[in-house]
Amino acid sequence: MAIFSSNVLSPLLPPDAEPIVIGLVNNMPDAALRTTERQFDELLTAASSNFVVQLRLFSVPEVPRSEAGRAHIDQHYEDIGRLWESRLDGLIVTGTEPRTPDLADEPYWSDLTKLIDWAEDHTISTVWSCLAAHAAVFHIDGIGRRPLRKKLSGVFDCERIIDHAIVDAAPTRWRLPHSRYNELPEVALASKGYQILSRSPDVGADVFVKKSNSLFIFFQGHPEYDAGALLREYRRDVGRFLAGERDTYPEIPRGYFDEESTDAFAAFQQRAMHNREIDLLSSFPAEEAKQKLRHLWREPAARIYANWFSYLVEQKSRRQARNEGRESARMHPYPNGTP
């Protein structure tokens, strides 16, 4: 199985620097599988200028896959059994499109809960992304996701509200993509000891953490998204409407497109409402809008992940020092000589 490194070794680092080993459990559906790999690879590379990072790929086997998707997993990912035998420094877990109203009814639920329990005891810190964050919080503390009235999609202003190592030196405000149909209530999170690091009136809790054996970091948004991710999702949802796979026309992502692109998409919607045919999708004005998109969240996202790397290195060093101290005490129980 393939193991590949996402980083470019900094010339300022010693050539024998010990790598930070990160596992990426990529559960995204087949259509987004390779894109998610690339997005995280690019983000971790941007954040790793002062670190050596090795990225190992895994996927929960019960996530429904096509034959092509399974072939890609078989060729480029490690078997999940090797994860259970590993002790990684950090772990990133993505979600997938939900198929049932209740997370516990998803086909991969038992594997995902096993992963949550494993991460608590075998990682220094784990990042839970979007639906994976909802699943982890539900499994750990029984906090269920709450359906939103409509899909939350767009780039939103979020504000850092407390100091924490994970958001150190990050701006007090940043813009971040969110794309989901559900949310975790802030009040319920706070009542169970989660620290909310950033929030927005539009999206609620943005980034939040909880520390036990491992520091769990939860993103309801998508700092890993590239500039065109929301455009591709919007086009996909428009295509589903035109194909009769959804009843309502999707709303334009908020705070994302310029005025000219927004007008073009509104005009296309009018055409689609009067001529609901999948062939119309070929004239969807995506390319024009794509040229004007800006990757506004890359810098703060890279800062947050660089802080995560720093945390992993610091905690790893402390654990090694404690282990060396215990070993020294075992080998030399009487530091001042024989009693």
Image (tube, rainbow, N blue to C red):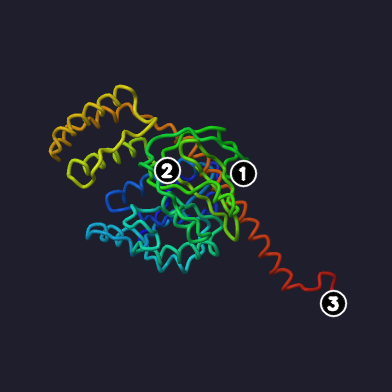
Q: Nearer the viewer, mark 2 or mark 3?
A: 2
Answer with the quarter of the image where residue 4 lies: bottom left
Furthest-top residue in this view:
260
User: Which residue carries the number 2 mark?
Assistant: 222
Q: Which mark is residue 164?
A: 1
Q: Position of residue 46 (x, y in %)?
A: 46, 40
Q: What is the crowding at mark 2: few (fewer than 14 residues within 10 Å), some, or many (at least 20)?
A: some
Q: CA distance from mark 2 to mark 3?
A: 59 Å
- Of labels 2 and 3, earlier in sequence is 2
Q: Are marks 2 and 3 in contact (CB under 8 Å)?
A: no
- Of labels 3 and 1, earlier in sequence is 1
Tag 2: amino acid:
His
User: Which residue carries the number 3 mark?
Assistant: 338
Q: Residue at x 36, y 42 (%)?
A: 151
Q: Secondary structure at mark 3?
A: loop
Q: From what the image shows, is residue 178 above or below residue 92?
A: above
Quarter occupied by the N terminus: bottom left
